[in-house]
């Protein structure tokens, strides 16, 4: 990169580089540019806008936070999936990061996401002796900066623990280092019947309805399931 708003020149001679587009990257591809010098060194997410000779991008603002250098950077295609709750319209939504969002499930009255991390401070890959990363201070061996949680097994992160640092990356893509040790995400969904005539009153209903008869009585339905990242799952959840 000549500058933060300039094209990316890609080394297409790398073994295994796909021949489609520019090393597998085509116009419209969602991609991530990663600083490979260490864990949490920084990244950018963008959409490829051109592949004629070099990789053109629609980087935000409208440029990257900084220049990514030769030999220390890798570009890979990614798929983004952001799930969120549209409470006014009672829908679970999916956002793809750039083109738009769409409803996944209707008649949703509550959604909860819980994030579980490895309790050990050294649960994130450490840098070589004498070097540092966003979650390690230099030393031989490097010294972990993450908190040690006293929980036996996985620790449920609080909102405060997801924003108290140490921080990785820079600018708009910076994130709390605890997110690097997520091992499990728990999702809880509560849904109700659309028709008022089959919803009653009481704790079984988030939205009271008009039903007063057991013959037309549909309580809210709640489901909880766990999702384990494939590359970071503890042994019982590994697939």
Image (spheres, rainbow, N blue to C red):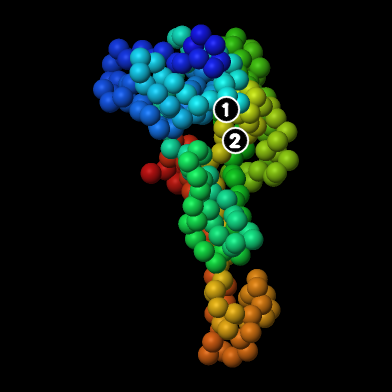
- Name the one closer to the observer, 42 or 146: 42
Placement of the C terminus among the 4 image quadrants? top left
- Taking the spot 58% from the left edge, 84% from the top edge, the residue there is 197
User: Where residue 81 appears, x then y in whole percent?
Assistant: 48, 43
User: Where residue 232 appears, x then y in whole percent?
Assistant: 48, 37
Image position of 84 with respect to 181: above or below: below
Image position of 90 with respect to 72: above or below: below
Q: Which residue is mark 1?
A: 60
Q: Real-space Cα distance between discs 1 and 2?
A: 23 Å
Left of 160 or right of it: where is 42?
A: left
**Res 29 quadrant in image:** top left
Q: Badges 1 and 2: C-beta atoms under 8 Å apart? A: no
Q: Tell me the mark number nearer the camera, choosing from 1 and 2.
A: 1
Asked whether the viewer can see residue 211, the reply is: yes
Q: Which residue is mark 2?
A: 179
- Taking the spot 49% from the left edge, 11% from the top edge, the residue there is 1
User: Where residue 30 appears, x then y in whole percent?
Assistant: 44, 32
- Taking the spot 59% from the left edge, 35% from the top edge, the residue there is 179
**Could you say whether the residue bearing mark 1 is in a helix, strand or loop?**
loop
**Could you say whether the residue bearing mark 2 is in a helix, strand or loop?**
helix
Asked whether the viewer can see residue 226, the reply is: no
Q: Earlier in the sequence, mark 1 or mark 2?
A: 1
- Taking the spot 64% from the left edge, 61% from the top edge, the residue there is 88
Tag shown at residue 163: none
- Name the one closer to the observer, 122 or 197: 197
Specify few, some or many for label 1: CA neighbours under 10 Å numbering under 14, 14-19, or 20 or more. Answer: some
Left of 219 or right of it: where is 56?
A: left
- Name the one closer to the observer, 6 or 80: 6
- Name the one closer to the observer, 14 or 186: 14
User: Where residue 200 appears, x then y in whole percent?
Assistant: 63, 82
């Amino acid at each position: 990169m000549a500058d933060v708003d300039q094209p990316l020149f890609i080394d297409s001679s790398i073994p295994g580089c796909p021949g489609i587009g520019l090393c597998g990257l085509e116009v419209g591809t969602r991609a991530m540019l990663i600083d490979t010098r260490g864990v949490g060194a920084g990244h950018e997410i963008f959409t490829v806008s051109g592949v004629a000779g070099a990789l053109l991008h629609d980087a935000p603002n409208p440029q990257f936070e900084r220049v990514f250098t030769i030999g220390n950077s890798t570009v890979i295609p990614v798929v983004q999936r952001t799930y969120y709750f549209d409470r006014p319209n009672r829908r679970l939504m999916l956002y793809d990061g750039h083109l738009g969002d769409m409803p996944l499930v209707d008649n949703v009255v509550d959604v909860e996401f819980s994030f579980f991390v490895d309790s050990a401070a050294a649960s994130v890959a450490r840098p070589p002796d004498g070097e540092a990363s966003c979650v390690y201070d230099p030393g031989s061996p490097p010294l972990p900066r993450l908190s040690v949680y006293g929980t036996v097994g996985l620790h449920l992160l609080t909102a405060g623990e997801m924003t108290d640092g140490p921080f990785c990356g820079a600018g708009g893509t910076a994130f709390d280092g605890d997110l690097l040790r997520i091992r499990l995400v728990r999702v809880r969904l509560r849904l109700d019947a659309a028709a008022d005539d089959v919803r009653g009153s009481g704790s079984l209903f988030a939205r009271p309805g008009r039903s007063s008869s057991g013959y037309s009585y549909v309580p809210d339905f709640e489901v909880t399931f766990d999702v384990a990242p494939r590359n970071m799952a503890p042994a019982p959840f590994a697939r």
